[in-house]
Amino acid sequence: MISRWVLSWAIVGTFCGLFAGLYWNILELMTHGLQRFQGLSLLLVMPLAGLVIGLVIHFLGNPGEIAVIVDNIHFRGGRLDARKNPSMILASLVSISARGSAGPEAPLVQVTGSFGTWVADRLRLEGEDVRSMSLAAMAAGFTALFGAPLGGAMFALEILHHQHIVEYYEALMPAIVSSCASYVVFAAITHLGIAPTWHFPQYHLDSIDDLAVAIMFGIIGVVAGWIFMGIFRGCDRIFALIPGPIYLRTTIAGLGLGILATFLPLTRYFGHEELDEVVNQSFPVIFLFMLAFAKMATISITVAGGWRGGFIIPLFFIGACVGKAVAVFIPGLNPTLAMICTMAAINVSVTRTPISTTLLLSKLTNFNPLTPILFASLIGFFLAPKVPFIASQLKSEKQTVISHQ
């Protein structure tokens, strides 16, 4: 069963893991360099970072967002353009290290996916083989950050469509093989992804009543997801009204982020480390709800304002805040169950990825019983808005046929 195809998928995953490890180490260096700026100094530093981001995009080109990647997978035969990588790499490094509320998953997926397309061209692949190679590389990018090979592989396939969970099923094995190779390489370089990312108190599924609780928090997570999407679309319309070059918009976004970070420091950054503070520290209910709403605003300002990055981990942060707030408000509820189920539901309501979100959260939080997460994820999927947040996930039957011809 080991063929040149398996070896090519593994080689692609290995190179993607190497790139992800290099990207992460550079990001860590830049982040530590900017950490010393706190308080009122952010009102200067973050607008300057926004200006730099805007100038990079202005001169090197707009790298697009996850919606562009989804469109290319659907309608360009899975071909991702590597010419946009310099702009994406530089803009995202500044965006994330300056503590914008967006994570590295989107940059990693775009760059690694385009590398898969490049490899497919070198091997003179055609048709679905090109798409499968690009998807395998995208999965390697997801896995490098999340440290869950199966979850990362599923995420790369699920996020492509709002209704058909795994539309390009022929890419599943390439994605899994590439993800495993990427996981090993990235973990060896960064020493991340072996242990759980966030340290939740232990939870054991002892009663079927907990499944009802999971469904309840799934509904709460969906409500939070709807609110987030409303805030985002409002911010998007506001920033669309700003005339002039993109660096004006990114600078204004930086000022808004700086103001929020000055008053609520936990809204800064994409939540990779800050989520542990929410889990392990005691906060008043009102503060947790306020923090969740502020995080919704910072994600919206970051992405709508032209900064670069992904919103998956920031959504998990919002879910943890909302879930813990409700658990504190209603005595007797298990806070771990509440937070993780809300995290699952809000992410699924926005990204439409129930299976991979279940797998990812189980790995990231060391939450062993999958069933409560799955129930909350399915609630998030079925109660999400009819029109998906990522508009390019919406594809008609006619378009589906055309994209496969």
Image: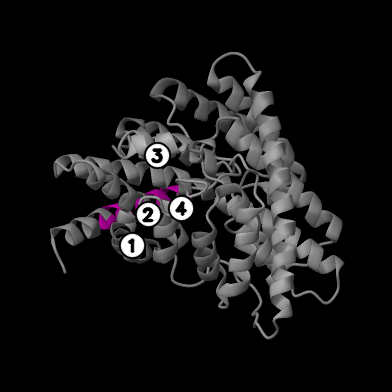
Amino acid on which disc 1 is placed: Ile
Q: Nearer the viewer, residue 295 or 175?
A: 175
Residue 212's place in the image compared with 165, above or below, is: below
Q: Residue at x 59, y 49 (%)?
A: 270
Q: Is the magenta region chiefly helix, strand or loop?
A: helix
Rendered location of residue 223, percent (x, y) = 74, 51
Query: Which quadrant does the N terminus fall into?
Result: bottom left
Q: Residues within 10 Å of mark 4 (few under 14, many from 20)?
A: many
SS at circle 2: helix
- Mark 2 or mark 4: name the one nearer the start of the chain: 2
Q: CA distance from mark 4 to mark 1?
A: 13 Å
> Circles 2 and 1: CB distance less than 8 Å?
yes
- The residue singled out by tag 1 in the image is 176
Residue range of the region highlighted in magenta in the rendering: 13-28
- Mark 4 or mark 1: name the one nearer the start of the chain: 4
- The residue singled out by tag 4 in the image is 158
